[in-house]
Amino acid sequence: MASLLRSPAATRAEALVEQAAGAPVLPLGSTPEPGAEAPAPPPVEEPSRALALSDVIAVKSGPGEALIRLAYRIGIPGHAIAAPFRRPQATRVLATVESPNRGDRAAGTALRAGHFLIHGVRLPIASFDFSVSAHQAPGVERVVHSFSWLADLAASAPRADAAAVAERIAGLWLHSHAAPGKGPAWEAELAGLRLVAWLVHAPLMLGGNDKGLKARLLAAIAETASWLDKRAAKEPAGFGQVAAWAGVVAAGLLLPHGKPRRLFGEAGLVTALGDMVGEDGGALSRCPAAQLDAIRLLTDLIACYAAAQVTPPPALAVMRELLVPPLLALRHGDGALGCWQGQGAIPADRVNAVIEASGVRTRPLGQAAGWGYQRIKSGETLLQFDTAPPPRAKHARTGCASTLAFEFSDGPQRIIVNCGGAALAGGQVPARIGQGLRATAAFSTLVLDNANSTAVLLHGKLGKGVETVDFDRRQIARPGHREATRIEAAHNGYASRFGLSHQRILTLSGDGTELAGEDILVPTSRNGKRGKIGFAIRFHLGRGVEVQLSPDKRGASLLLPDGRLWQFRLGGDRGGAGEITLHAEDSLWVDGDGRPHATEQLVIEGLALRSGGQFSWRFRKTG
């Protein structure tokens, strides 16, 4: 019974914690060898005492460490706790970190040539406005103020050649940010990432000949660490809080008298990690970029432990291992990620580099109720289906109204996609269309009355709309064929405005050559409303897909760039109030480097009765 009261991630986390601690454990789902002593069954727990993920990975410590944490939390300086009868040491970085994470060599080369290269746009360093009052695109602010560009610079040249560039940019930044707490640079997430980057790449930052700049950087490191000590606990749950605590822990590992800070930070970090993810290891922001960032950050932090020769809490490795399978579920056959929650199709080399650096070897997560993305792979065909509400406003990074959208690929070729790229607006993607890329119409799903299924607000936030999604997944036997996989899901995002819920059924054949779909509008009250309402079912086509409508306007041929051929066909409809048309429209798709590409979309359009309707369609591979 106890295992039923835990989330899947909590159950798996318990096994991983035991492995990390050196206890012999059986693989999940296995049985003991004949004659071996079976492990004792877990104690039965009341529902109110069932273990949550944060409980499973919580830092275990004795009374001495607990007392140190308490003393540091109430404001006693670290040196007074760690060495009460000695003079405090001057700020210095105690060890050199060797992180397996690698930056983008092209972006680093651009830095050496005098430009930031962000989302495909070159921004001259000499004329860049670092000031507190400057208004930059969010993606630009994130790269510049988090100092993530240090990894790119380190990947592009030997340290001696890159140090001068790092010094130049750091000097310009410090000149504009003399005091902490003001401007976007002092969002806790960016401050935490910046502190980790400074410490991981300390030889690059501090290895130059400018003694005055070195002193200013060391003072900034100490000041940022002290600021995060006070700020991290006040941040809402999510990656921002995790990044803030990671900065505290890194400083505790690599600055003098750091043990009290480290112990204090570890407790906060592990709790924040447990609060950041859902029941299956997916970030509550439902954003693949946030998932990727979290894996990369944990890899850097574990490298800091290795440099300091301190054993990390088992929870850090556990969380990293839990984060990888949901991310892998969003990879298409080309190795790049799907376009979800504002992100472009993050390229395969970037994803592979982060996964390889983590050292985690695992399979994609197929069924993810909490993460919300269902994955079906049959033959070379892969389907990704969003079967969960959008993230809550407090978790959303660039929240999108994408419920019941899907992406569909055949080998390395993408057939059906979402537009993506809202989080990259302000680079090559014009800022004025960023809001539109978050709308339901920018996703491959049904839209009622040209309205969003969840309200899209400013600054990446979301309002009212989809609150619940009911879904069911099952295998369907077909005589003479391999079992098909059927997923049925329904959301209530249109219920309050139009009195209708949207139900979508997707069935992928066992050999991957046919995808059958039904979009159903179901009245939410016994007496359905009278009248008609406009609807559109949109299928955004992958880059390079050539579309040709059939003469009867009930189907289309889709020729993929490598010559594969798929046929699209409308089925029957019930509840249509007039002619249902199929036509092609312009669309766009944003790649992982922030470049928009002109594409097309198929659109089923017409009027539906307010009392409900049913519309079926089918993709079939013919060549």
Image: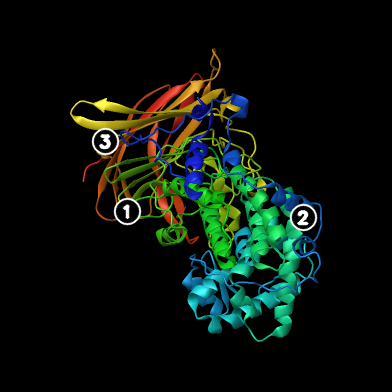
**Which residue is label 3 attached to?**
510
Residue 534 against residue 400 in the figure, above or below: above
Q: Say which residue appears at 73% left-offset and 70% top-offset.
A: 220
Question: Is tag 2's residue or tag 1's residue first in the polypeptide sequence?
Answer: 2
> In the image, residue 191 lies at what x, y percent?
68, 61
Q: Say which residue appears at 51% left-offset and 52% top-offset.
A: 317
> Relative to 481, is 364 on the left or the right?
right
Badge number at residue 72? 2
**Which residue is label 1 attached to?**
412
> In the image, residue 149 lies at what x, y percent?
57, 69
Q: Secondary structure at mark 2?
A: helix
* Viewer-closest of 490 and 159: 159
Question: Is tag 3's residue or tag 1's residue first in the polypeptide sequence?
Answer: 1
**Residue farthest along the top direction in this orientation:** 527
> In the image, residue 380 lies at what x, y percent?
28, 46
> In the image, residue 177 lies at what x, y percent?
75, 69
Question: Is tag 2's residue or tag 3's residue first in the polypeptide sequence?
Answer: 2
Q: Say which residue appears at 54% left-offset and 50% top-offset.
A: 314
> Which mark is nearer the camera, 2 or 1?
2
Q: The disc labelled 2 sits on which kind of residue? A: Tyr
> Which mark is nearer the camera, 2 or 3?
2
* Mark 2–mark 1 distance (CA, rounded to whole Å): 53 Å
Q: The disc labelled 1 sits on which kind of residue? A: Pro
